[in-house]
Image (spheres, rainbow, N blue to C red):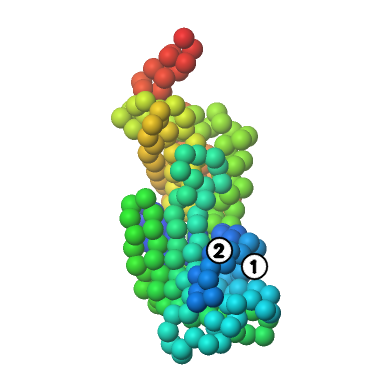
């Protein structure tokens, strides 16, 4: 299927939220019984419901049973933490307000209000849009991909900076891979006291690891044909001195 007409520079907010939810390992739950944090205690259904596997005596079960029908009974918070160590590692936060419904072996959370906050600001996502969206196909592999790129191929990251404008690299002291999705790779450019992000777009969406390998190869070929930015050259010269 040719989806060139629907390809965009970045994931839509609903897909970004679903990707964050799919990859998150922990969550914080705020309900009438207080706030609890869980690690490895949730799974996500295809329609975006969060299934919480909590102890039988958890206060959350009481909250779910006693909450008025149709009213939000809890708020779930998820943090998207960059897998590669960078300054300000929280890439985004996701809040879900909704109902907790007790089931046989878990609590089923039905979101009715979804808020995603990224560096660009917060956006409210409609429940139907959230349900219809699917996670990015690289979401579950992203952490491994980025850590491998940063640890095993630092020369490739440095080579990719040739695709970044000199203004963005001015004063750079470190460049690290921050994020990757089917649309492109994001680099975090750190300066002495500030930082910024630059996005390198793929020439076409990458919907699996084989496609991603090809897209990265194309970026590196493009970088090989580009000259080294003067800002980075000055940075190297200063470091050598």
**CA separation in Å, label 1 and label 2:** 8 Å
Q: Position of residue 173 (x, y in %)?
A: 44, 26
Q: Earlier in the sequence, mark 1 or mark 2?
A: 2
State the residue in front, 62 or 230.
62
Which residue corresponds to the image point at 47% horizontal and 71% vertical from the top-left?
Answer: 75
Q: Confirm whether residue 111 shows in the render.
A: no
Q: Where residue 117 appears, x then y in whole percent? A: 39, 58
Q: Which residue is labeled 2 in the image?
A: 27
The quadrant holding residue 58 is bottom right
Which residue matches tag 1?
41
What's the mark number on residue 11?
Answer: none
Q: Secondary structure at mark 1?
A: loop
Q: Residue at x 56, y 60 (%)?
A: 24
| Foreground of the two, 61 or 16 | 61
* Circles 1 and 2: CB atoms closer than 8 Å: yes
Secondary structure beneath label 2: strand
Image position of 195 with respect to 112: above or below: above
Q: Is residue 231 above or below residue 127?
A: above
- Give the residue furthest to the bottom: 69
Where does the image place residue 119, in percent across and percent down from the top left?
37, 50
């Amino acid at each position: 299927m040719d989806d060139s007409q629907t390809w965009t520079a970045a994931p839509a907010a609903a897909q970004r939220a679903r990707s964050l939810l799919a990859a998150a390992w922990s969550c914080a739950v705020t309900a009438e019984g207080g706030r609890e944090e869980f690690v490895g205690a949730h799974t996500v259904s295809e329609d975006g419901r969060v299934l919480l596997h909590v102890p039988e005596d958890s206060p959350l079960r009481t909250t779910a049973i006693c909450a008025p029908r149709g009213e939000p009974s809890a708020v779930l918070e998820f943090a998207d933490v960059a897998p590669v160590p960078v300054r300000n590692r929280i890439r985004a936060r996701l809040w879900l307000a909704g109902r907790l419904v007790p089931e046989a072996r878990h609590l089923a959370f039905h979101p009715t209000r979804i808020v995603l906050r990224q560096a660009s600001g917060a956006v409210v996502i409609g429940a139907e849009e959230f349900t219809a969206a699917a996670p990015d196909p690289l979401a579950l592999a992203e952490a491994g991909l980025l850590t491998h790129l940063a640890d095993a191929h630092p020369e490739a990251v440095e080579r990719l900076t040739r695709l970044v404008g000199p203004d963005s690299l001015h004063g750079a002291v470190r460049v690290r891979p921050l994020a990757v999705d089917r649309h492109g790779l994001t680099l975090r450019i750190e300066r002495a006291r500030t930082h910024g992000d630059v996005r390198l777009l793929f020439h076409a969406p990458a919907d699996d690891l084989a496609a991603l390998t090809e897209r990265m190869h194309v970026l590196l070929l493009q970088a090989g044909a580009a000259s080294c930015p003067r800002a980075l050259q000055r940075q190297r010269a200063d470091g050598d001195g």
